[in-house]
Image (cartoon, helix red, strand yellow):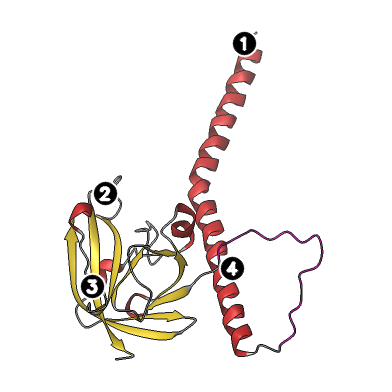
Amino acid sequence: MLKRKGFKMKKLALLLIITGALIALYPLGEWAYTHYLQQKTMVAWEEEVQAVAEPEKEVIDEPAGVQQPEVPLPIAVLTIKKINLELPVFQGATTTNLRIGAGLVEDGVNAGESGTVIISAHRSHTFGRQFNRLDELEKGDQIEITSRDGVYKYEVYKTDIVKPEEIAVQQGDNAEKTLLLITCHPLYSINPPYRLLVWAKQIEPA
């Protein structure tokens, strides 16, 4: 009887160890899969840009039966060299889009148009991913948006920390061509009460 009880205790201990290991490994697995999806979207973006540049190039279909994860196609790529960031930008700040990259907020405009381009991304807990290092940007730093229409360069002119309801942008034909990057603040908080804002002005094309 005691042996049987001891056997059950050993099984329970082993189960707890396995469960603990799985819980510990889950964030790593989630990060790896998200990173894979992000890289896949970047490859899809590069292939599309190349296809536009070489319209007569033969398109090779995937072999029948090959299942590929469905991922949205980026509309642009955001590059911030200072923080070593290259992030796909998708249409709309949806849960799926923000899981993989950044989202173009619908209240904003497209790059190159008069008004404010608004791009939102998560403040990832992993160093260097998504907008994790956005707080390092300072006045004078440069940001690039590469879209199908060309490359747009912006220069940071201010940063701010505000409550979500305090975010205000100017739109319209007479508005300046600006860029607003938005993420949660502070880092590592649950339901963060503030938003970190980075404002930049378009400098190229002038």
Spot occupied by residue 187 in the image (x, y as percentages of width and height)? 28, 55
Q: Is residue 135 above or below residue 84?
A: above
Determine which residue is flagged by label 3.
Answer: 199
What segment is highlighted magenta in the picture? Answer: 57-72
Element marked by disc 2? loop
Mark 4 closeness class: few <14, some 14–19, many ≥20 residues within 10 Å: some
Q: Is residue 171 left or right of residue 16?
A: left
Q: Amino acid at mark 2?
A: Pro
Q: Amino acid at mark 4?
A: Lys
Q: Quadrant of the N terminus?
A: top right
Spot occupied by residue 70 in the image (x, y as percentages of width and height)? 62, 59
Give the farthest residue toward the front. Answer: 173
Query: Which of the pair 16/34 is nearer the observer?
Result: 34
- Give the label, 1 or 4, closer to the camera: 4
Spot occupied by residue 105 in the image (x, y as percentages of width and height)? 36, 63
At 55% from the left edge and 63% from the top edge, which residue is drawn? 72
Determine which residue is flagged by label 2.
Answer: 192
At 22% from the left edge and 66% from the top edge, which residue is drawn? 169
Q: Earlier in the sequence, mark 1 or mark 4?
A: 1
Q: Earlier in the sequence, mark 4 or mark 2?
A: 4
At 45% from the left edge and 75% from the top edge, which residue is drawn? 77
Q: Amino acid at mark 1?
A: Leu
Q: Earlier in the sequence, mark 3 or mark 2?
A: 2
Q: Is residue 182 left or right of residue 50?
A: left
